[in-house]
Image (tube, rainbow, N blue to C red):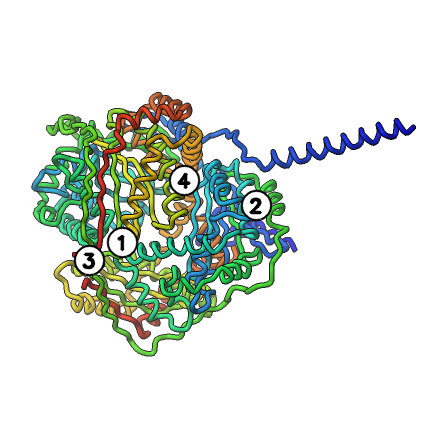
Amino acid sequence: MLKKIILPFILILFSNFNIAALPNNIEHETLKNGLQVYYIPTTTPSVTLVVAYSVGSINEESGKEGIAHLLEHLMFLGTYGLSKNEYSNRLKNIGASYNAYTTYDATVYYTTLPNNYLNELLYIEADRMQFLRFNSNDIANEINIVIEENNAHNNQQYSTFFDLIKQISFTTNNYGRSIIGYSDTFSLISLADVKEFYTNWYKPSNATLVIIGGFDVASTKKQVKKNFARISNIQGHSSVTRVFQPQLTANININYTNAAIKQAMIVKSFLAPSYMSDTSNNKIESSSLFLLASILNLPTSTLYKNLVSNNKLANDISIYYNFQQKGTTNFMVVAKPNLGISYSTLVTQLNTTLDLYKNNIITEKELKRVKKLLLADLEYSKENQENFAIQLAHWSAIGLNLSNIFQFYSNLDNITVKDVNNSLLKLINQKFILATANAD
Amino acid sequence: MIIQENLIYKASLYLACGVAILFVAILWYKYQPKNNVVIKYDSLYILQNSVIIDKNITLYNNTDSNIIAINILIKGGSFIDPADKIGLANLFAKTLEKGVGGLNYDNFNEYLLDNSLVFNVSASRDYIEINIKGLIENQKALFNLVNMLLVQPNLSNLELDLAKKDVLSVLVSNSNNGLFLLSSKMLQVLYNKHYYPTVGEALFVNKITSTDLVKFKQNIFNQQNIYIAISGNINEEISLKFLQPILKQLPYNNNLDLQNLQQVILPNIYNNNINIYKQNLQQSQALIVFNAPPVTNINNIYKLHILNLYLGGMPDSYLFNEIRNKKGLVYSINSAIYKDLHTSYWYVYLAASENNIDLAITETITAITSILNGNFTTKDLKTAYKWYLLNNISNYNTNLSIATYLNQLQFNNITYNDYQIINYELDTLIKEDIKEILNTIDIDKFIILKTISGK
């Protein structure tokens, strides 16, 4: 059943947070086969098309780690209708820039090109959604490339350190496993495995299209229907709706050494609900944590001043909170000690400062500032159409529709200082992982 | 009757065939890539619609936006670092980020946040670069920031101390970064003197004082040396109203004669040295470096850039296909032309496991040599040029990228007329034009820099 929503007038209802900062002409429809489509026309001469599939490493069987990411590579090797060379030549001839990424929860393909060629791109995307072609040689070759990608990943100073923290944080689901996969198990992935994975997950009911840029909505809708409406859903899996990780039962200390590390690092990591997995009323807990992370990340925060600018114990401090993850996620405080500062000194000051926060020291001023900054960020993000479209597609792939997104921003406006302080109190009273990384 | 029936039958058959052929032709045409593109808002359009509102100040009035972005280039980067103060330009840039206008670090951060300003300062070999963007409603605060940066930088020990910690941290982190190491080593090969990396070396950075910073500022902060480009919803009158009083507070010129320091270094790679460096990393990396046309010949550099796109600078390039897709030897491989005020070179970067790196290098050199020996066609160049032209449309969608692009042209003294000529030459580029350039480069002269594991 075709479903069409035009949302601009709804924005009038949300006055305080000014959600009109979001593009106010987003149209959405759901095709009969379940494909979600978002249309965001602007005045630019380029257009970005994003196709997001609700599948990632969270959906992999044990022993087949890396198959989602491997399939992402294979998606660029041509179809039964377009050979590999034809496929890449077509994209080159139309001036396209393209890339893709795989996360735990979604696999996202994005292409930016002059708007004259949108129709051709729609054809190409529909083609590879249903008629991807690859053989054992292609798989073997791509595995070699993925192994090199894994090496490049491991070359980054802290990659394996963060992988380890995740491995220990997430013991009941795939968030603790590598998205790229493991060299030991690549050889276990067969042609039949990859074909099955493709058939099960790459289908319209599991996909979202986002089109943003200078295009005519009416004629593009016709092209979308022409190319995608006829694609049927072969019976397969539905993406997991809930990913849960129980809280730690004890604090865990990790001492990690690696010759690749030149600058030491300390991470204090807590488990926290993501927006999707948050069961609190109006998602108040995750929304508060989102604002909390934003506040703590500012150089005006007490945390930053105590550790970096005033006491000069750390060179940098950052908060990582992946609230867009489908399931339970990490809330991490990351600090790099200045040269000559010991771990224990930095950890002591970190804990002392976090204890300070137990006294509700986050102020109304800080909260107001961060809300204002988020609005400004929304304005800036509208300039970068590609990023905006990718974000929207990713949210849709993890199960959020546009109403949810609007609701999220609306909720933020209702979050009070008390909510933020409460969320922080709950967080730091939990068990945690304290991890230190150093050179060999 | 029979004859008539036969005729009718034949006519019907021919008609049916004709319709079928027409139908197939229509289908074939419909699914062919369309080549007729009316290009608006490409780089030429932006340049054509920008206005030089004062000496070294360009404005692109983007009424579609509610953002203003400014890019400022101040000539004089690490190429004027004294030999005993390597990293001075970079440290100067980082110090500006720690407080200006008499505001200490905390108050400065509050100023930026409360006015929703996004701002950074960096140094390259050629210049100090300042990027600022803000919403229209905060334009006064934005230009006030420009004033504080250019006229009232603090440069005291407080800011310097904070900046040093940042820079030293970067130096420590980069000590195991293969690409950073290779790029630094490449400079040593290419420059007879003053090959120092912009970020400096810890030994020298530690010794830089606040007095050094002040002197550096005095050397380069003058009206002759500053290039400004603005893109956003702001007109000429308001832009000048803000900028002219700021610039008037700066000296017109200064004692340091940058012209004399700008010696063009002609391409000087003459052998096939292989330079190996050890690092504790799982993956090896390599740079293969060739000469490029001298910087005085910007037209030739642009032409070579088109071949470079085909070779390794665009998606699914020749090298990407040959070395990664077909042979699976690498994850990353790409090529680019580097150019600064003094010199230029052409390089290919690749990363592979240590088991594969030597084979990957050999195969890459074979592939490159084949191309540089003329194994490409005019059609390849046309494809690359088309990609370049069309991709430009997507590149200039943010005000900051537009301001940056305009300022780079301004800084390098490329006018609209120059750019039109360049575009014309690229549009009519044929294989023979590139071959002429390749003959001047001498494709047999290159150096290899490579990292392997070990201490």
Horizontal side of residue B448 vs A77, given as left or right:
left
| Residue position marked by numbered label 4 in the rendering | B66
Quarter of the picture holding the C terminus of chain B: bottom left
Amino acid residing under circle 2: Gly
Nearer the camera: disc 4 or disc 1: 1
- Disc 4 crowd, CA 10 A, few/some/many (<14, 14-19, 20+): some
Horizontal side of residue B28 vs B239, given as left or right:
right
Residue at far right of view: B1
Which circle marks residue A81 in the picture?
2
Query: What chain letter is assigned to the residue under label 4?
Result: B
How many angstroms separate mark 2 from mark 4 (CA)? 44 Å
Nearer the camera: disc 2 or disc 4: 2
Q: Is residue B103 above or below residue A395?
A: above
Is there one chain holding both mark 3 and mark 4?
no
| Residue position marked by numbered label 1 in the rendering | B354
Amino acid residing under circle 3: Lys
Q: Is residue A361 above or below residue A208?
A: below
Nearer the camera: disc 1 or disc 2: 1
SS at badge 3:
loop
Amino acid residing under circle 1: Glu
Is there one chain holding both mark 4 and mark 1?
yes
How many angstroms separate mark 1 from mark 3 (CA)? 21 Å
Residue contact at pointers 3 and 2, CB within 8 angstroms:
no
Amino acid residing under circle 4: Asn
| Residue position marked by numbered label 3 in the rendering | A262
